[in-house]
Amino acid sequence: MTTKRYLPPSALNSFLEGLPQAVSISTIGKSVKGLPISLLTIGNGKTKILMWSQMHGNESTTTRALLDFIPWFLKATQKHLQKTFTLSVILQLNPDGAKAYTRLNANGVDLNRDAIDLTQPESVVLQELYQEINPDYCLNLHGQRTIFSAGKMGKTASLSFLAPSADLERSITPSRKKAMHLIVALKRALEKELPEQVGRYDDAFNPNCVGDKFTQMGTPTILFEAGHVPEDYQREITRKYIFESYKTLLYTLFSNDFEYTTNEYFDIPENAKDYVDLIVSGVTIKSNDESFVEQELAIQYEERLEKNEVIFVPVMQFFASQAPVKAHKKIRIPKGLKNKEISFEKGKIIQKDVFERFLSI
Ligand SMILES: [Zn+2]
């Protein structure tokens, strides 16, 4: 069983079995298909942090970082943190989606658009837990596609954060302000290793998003988006940075030293959708019986679950003499090379032999 992008609920069993007795594990509800939703309660401090991952089933990076973070938190050297914090952790809020490798739950609902209506059992579980715990902070843990840049035509967004809005005016309420200051602390800690690769997610208010709702209810909430590092399609490098960010968050809260300005939060470049995975240039494109020479072909990988592995299928997006986007990888086909004609159709998968020929250049 792979422990990388595909993380079905069964892959967590050995981790859960290995946890010491100091961690309380309870089943707090069931998914649409009847899979248990588990809550881990760790530490016994006054400051309560509620964190949930994989409400989108195919976003496993933040969960994998929790598998690093929880044993770290439990170490004897972290006694001071264990006495300060009580962590309530849901590793997989959407276990059906985690099993099927889908964003949506088994009823095809986006759980991060169900915070008001609460039509899904998984949404009810989170809402009831929130009310029961009344947390001081919430962490809403997600993964981000490869299409995002940190700022318009900026570098790839390797990590993005958001202090969600609590109203249509996007007011800086006291809880939102606290979340913004914490994000600045995270950004400062990351920027040496990831210069210009930390982004700020769009803050348009949507009360159906869980983070917006909890912020509105007065809890500082931080959205984490595990993004892309070039060539790291398994997201093992991103996993490491997310782990570091969890640690930084606790250190920052522990030292209670995060009086920054909200300006510094707004200085974090906002995410733009400016990337594709691959651009192949120097190709001849056939489209609608016409031939276009010296073109750039933009390709995006589609993630598919096959035999318990996530595979990346190359799909044609568009072509242009100069593609108006950036790419994580660029290949130029040398002049004079034969068989460089491609029949274009948007959304079509590129044939395996053609694609392998590109990659061998
Ligand atoms: Zn998500």
Image (tube, rainbow, N blue to C red):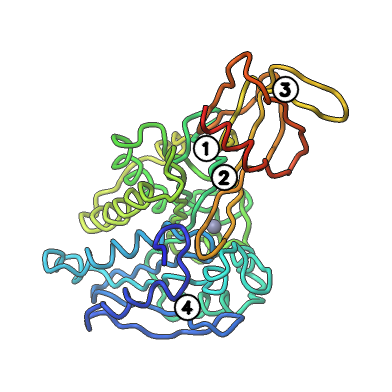
Residue 216's x, y, as percent? 53, 62
Q: Which residue appears at 50% of the width and 59% of the height?
A: 59
The residue pinned by badge 3 equals: 284
Whether label 4 touches label 1, CB < 8 Å:
no
Which of these two is toward me, 128 or 39?
39
Q: Quadrant of residue 195?
A: top left
Q: Is residue 96 above or below residue 276?
A: below
Q: Which residue appears at 52% of the width and 57% of the height?
A: 310
Inspect the image, locate mark 4, and give the three-letter code of the amino acid beneath it. Gln
Label 4 secondary element: helix
Q: Earlier in the sequence, mark 3 or mark 1?
A: 1
In the rendered structure, the answer to whether residue 73 lies left or right of residue 268 reads left
- Separation of disc 4 and disc 1 at Cα? 32 Å
- Separation of disc 3 and disc 1 at Cα? 35 Å
The residue pinned by badge 4 equals: 131
Inspect the image, locate mark 1, and give the three-letter code of the amino acid beneath it. Glu
Other residues around mark 1 within 10 Å, as few (<14) / some (14–19) / many (≥20): many
Label 3 secondary element: strand
Whether label 3 touches label 2, CB < 8 Å:
no
Other residues around mark 3 within 10 Å, as few (<14) / some (14–19) / many (≥20): many
The residue pinned by badge 1 equals: 270
Q: Which residue appears at 34% of the width and 63% of the height?
A: 66
Q: Earlier in the sequence, mark 2 or mark 1?
A: 2
Other residues around mark 4 within 10 Å, as few (<14) / some (14–19) / many (≥20): few
Q: Which mark is residue 279?
A: none
Q: Earlier in the sequence, mark 3 or mark 4?
A: 4
